[in-house]
Amino acid sequence: MKPKRIVIIGAVASGTKTAAKAKRENPDAEITLITEEAEISYASCGTPYFISDMIKNSHSLIIREPDYFRKMLNVDVLTEHRAESIDPETKRVEITNLKTNESLTLDYDRLVLAVGSIPNLPDFEGVGYGNILTLHNIPSAMQIKSLIRQKKVKDALIVGGGFIALEMAESLITHGINTRLIIRRGQILSNFDKDIALLVQNYIKTKGVQILEEDEVREFKADAEGNVANVITKKQTVPAEFVLLATSIRPNIQLAKRAGIEIGQTGAIQVNKKLETNIPDIYAVGDCVETMHLITGKPAWIPLATTSNKHGRVAGINITGGNDTFPGILGTFVVKVFDWSVAKTGLSEKEAIKNGFDTESIIVPSNDKAHYYPGSKRIIVKLITEKRNGLLLGAEIVGDGVVDKRIDVVASAMTGRATVEQLSKYDLSYAPPYSSPMDPVITAANVLHNKLKGKINSISAMEVKDKIDRKDDFILLDVRTKPEYNSGYIEGCIHIPLNDLSSKMDQLDKSKEIVTYCGVGLRASNAHRILKNAGFQDAKFMEGSMAAWVYKIIK
Amino acid sequence: MKPKRIVIIGAVASGTKTAAKAKRENPDAEITLITEEAEISYASCGTPYFISDMIKNSHSLIIREPDYFRKMLNVDVLTEHRAESIDPETKRVEITNLKTNESLTLDYDRLVLAVGSIPNLPDFEGVGYGNILTLHNIPSAMQIKSLIRQKKVKDALIVGGGFIALEMAESLITHGINTRLIIRRGQILSNFDKDIALLVQNYIKTKGVQILEEDEVREFKADAEGNVANVITKKQTVPAEFVLLATSIRPNIQLAKRAGIEIGQTGAIQVNKKLETNIPDIYAVGDCVETMHLITGKPAWIPLATTSNKHGRVAGINITGGNDTFPGILGTFVVKVFDWSVAKTGLSEKEAIKNGFDTESIIVPSNDKAHYYPGSKRIIVKLITEKRNGLLLGAEIVGDGVVDKRIDVVASAMTGRATVEQLSKYDLSYAPPYSSPMDPVITAANVLHNKLKGKINSISAMEVKDKIDRKDDFILLDVRTKPEYNSGYIEGCIHIPLNDLSSKMDQLDKSKEIVTYCGVGLRASNAHRILKNAGFQDAKFMEGSMAAWVYKIIK
């Protein structure tokens, strides 16, 4: 007999998806959805856009009303109910009705935990003052929006540099609020490599976001009404009538732990490919579980709505007697930050090295459309690969051009375990409004393949910066045109335009290390070939050149 | 010793790419580029945008000047020179200087044919009259643009329905020209399935393009000056002061044939994966060659700029003593038609069937972004798969939303030989401005996987139309809301909104075949499940529903 009584705890993305899918698989299933919240099935990813007023009505963020589940799917929905405990022996869940404080018990044949994640609240002194908030659901979004609407917020501080922090920085700037972002390290987006993160960081500074780098909150100070007014940090004191705590989140595992459900090495609930926990008939899905990372082969906790939705389908099939599996994740994501898109798939180079890979990488800026097509914009592609076999390990792509397409292509290639060489020959679509005949990821793959084959010799902007800081004895050669050079150059460089290089290269010491740079790396690459062919012992070009240079420019 | 003397015939995309890559691989190579044209290395794909005035200056379309190749790469460039014959024995090319009519001879160690394609000029009576033109290079684009600028063109006729025809239809409409398009069959885009092609066809009609369907040019009539004035077709006579012949193109193979180079079954030059012809030391690249289709495993001739550029790299490596291969193509392409994007990868269902595949397919309309995000638009995804194993065979995606990203994802998946089930679990990027948590291709893959597994029962809009035309005895059930129904429905349907279905289904005959439809197929799918569960013997839903219905609507 097919299992009939299904209890699902949590009703945002993965919980409601599980319910809907299970009901489609087995219309006779008796399903109960339990949630502490008043709303179910809402798009938490849309909350920053609701706060920025791009989305006017919070109702737009509700995908499905409880009544849809009740009437159309015949799923019982208990909102504002908290699951207190699970007894795997008797297969029962103890529940409290938060409105009446009454207790009730539900029996299950199959139980699904879809309890999501919860914000880590740092224990800064004064963290309990008014207007120090987190953004994790619709009520919290409405609270922030109403605070902004009162127009009393002149200064805001965002604690953290992850993607919610960045989306909210944009929201607050849109409202004309003086916005600061405080990060413990020197870079936002800690899961990105520093070279790419700093490009985004420089960009958002131009949009008016002030970044308190390598700084930490020490204490919040309140006004007479008990609302936050000032923030004392390690380095300074800043005003803030609103503080958003966007530091980090953790999987919500307390209920699972109490029931004896195994927690994995990442701190999230451990499940197999069928999304079963270690306890028979208990499944877990969405942000509260860890899943296999397709590149490392190890468990990873990267909570994303995309994974939650897929989990819901897989669990919905399995709890109704079917057989489906979830293969794992790459952690692909994209975030809009003002006019830039910031995306990643797989591992950053830093993460790849931490996971024991011997890596090679490249940064290649390109136009997102045919260079002559109006509105063509720049994107910067970083590809990371395993040195010994060229297998793709990850990519980071940023810029004001079309980024999401390229990250999805790399993610698709990585799912098929492609090498950079294979990627360089992918048959991707092209017409001038969409791409170049050689798409930016194909170009990047070609350059990285050349690097792996030893056909080119290049170093990153960060390495050049280190060389300068170390006062290495090397020639830094700017091969751009005179007007480009005059618009800003790197300190200590020699300027010889590429066109003049052959005739003027005898000014340069052939025995010295020489690093060429240009606008995006193309001319610099040509220049280093010319120098190499002319007998220079150690010619390299700077990857991405000025487009990847996040440091000081002399004007 | 590495081969030094390289002669490349043809200098648009693949020829110049071959030269540049060869020079980078071996700076000592002595390379000569020969072309009959005055320009080299231009973007022929950009010509429709030059004609529409979106790109003002033809110079923007020139990627590289001959002087760049001469001075920067040290490549000899002979423009306005025609290669007359090749002698593989003596390894010589006979050439005519078209400006002076002088002959010259070039010796080669390696020869590369990059001679492209040429338009098929139909032998309609009067085809030689003035202002009956083709669009195949920059001079022809300038000729068309100058004709339009004279403002004497009130009516134009485009012969053909391929992507150049569609791009040019948009260009001409932009100029306020009354534009007709004549096609021999009932559909534009003959390499698309009819259901998708008709969606595009209906759309461009709304933009003012008149389509003469199942019609053919019989004769052109000229005015007193010998310029075209009227066109007599099989069915009618239409005025036209400008006729664009965009019927078809063919590989340029005459020179190759005369040299004894093998021509393949597609009529294009046959090459192996190294892009070698059957004659030692002669290579061929770009639009003049056929290449292996990655899905059929058979040779295919699908000339595209993307392939040409990749060919150039592979040939450039091989002719300088390296070893690279070109794996094959999917024929992925995208074209902008007014505000729609129209894209395809792999095989259409028609082509798949012709190639012996037992196919299954689905049409699924979706929003390209989160449905609540401002500017979210619709795209329509058709996925084609092999029935027995679910392997992806092709996709066609159209609409005014973001299409190119999705076609590139499917192309990438197909390169990795993915099944629809695998595609449905791809870890693609998501944030509200970019996609839904379930990307449109993932949703389509899920629906198709359900169809393959027999979990859903659906038929295409075209099949429904056939059933209506055949006067089949079946129930057509519209499950939309009353206002939606009132805005237009399919003749002969019964209307019961989904919300009322359970209470009103006893009005319907359970033994009869019943086909449900809604706006995009989602509610129709739910409805057919409800009916099936209620004991209806033969319930189906119409794939894509009204969004895929290209036929008459009753208002």
Image: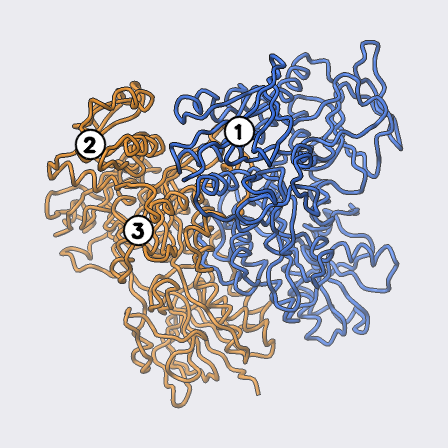
Chain colours: A orange, B blue
Residue A56 on image: x %, y %:
45, 44
Residue type at numbered disc 1? Asp
Mark 2 belongs to chain: A
User: What is the number of callouts on the image?
Assistant: 3
Left or right of B282, for residue A170: left
Mark 3 belongs to chain: A
Residue A88 on image: x %, y %:
38, 86
Q: Nearer the viewer, mark 2 or mark 1?
A: 1
Quarter of the picture containing the N terminus of chain A is bottom right
Q: Which mark is residue B107?
A: 1
Residue B138 on image: x %, y %:
60, 22
Left or right of B210, for residue A222: left
Which residue of the protein is positioned furthest toward the front in this rendering?
B90
Q: As rendered, which of A26 and A495 lies closer to the eye? A: A495
Q: Nearer the viewer, mark 3 or mark 1?
A: 1
Write down the residue under mark 3.
A360
* Disc 2 from disc 1: Cα separation: 53 Å
Residue type at numbered disc 2? Lys
Write down the residue under mark 2.
A552
Q: Secondary structure at mark 3?
A: strand
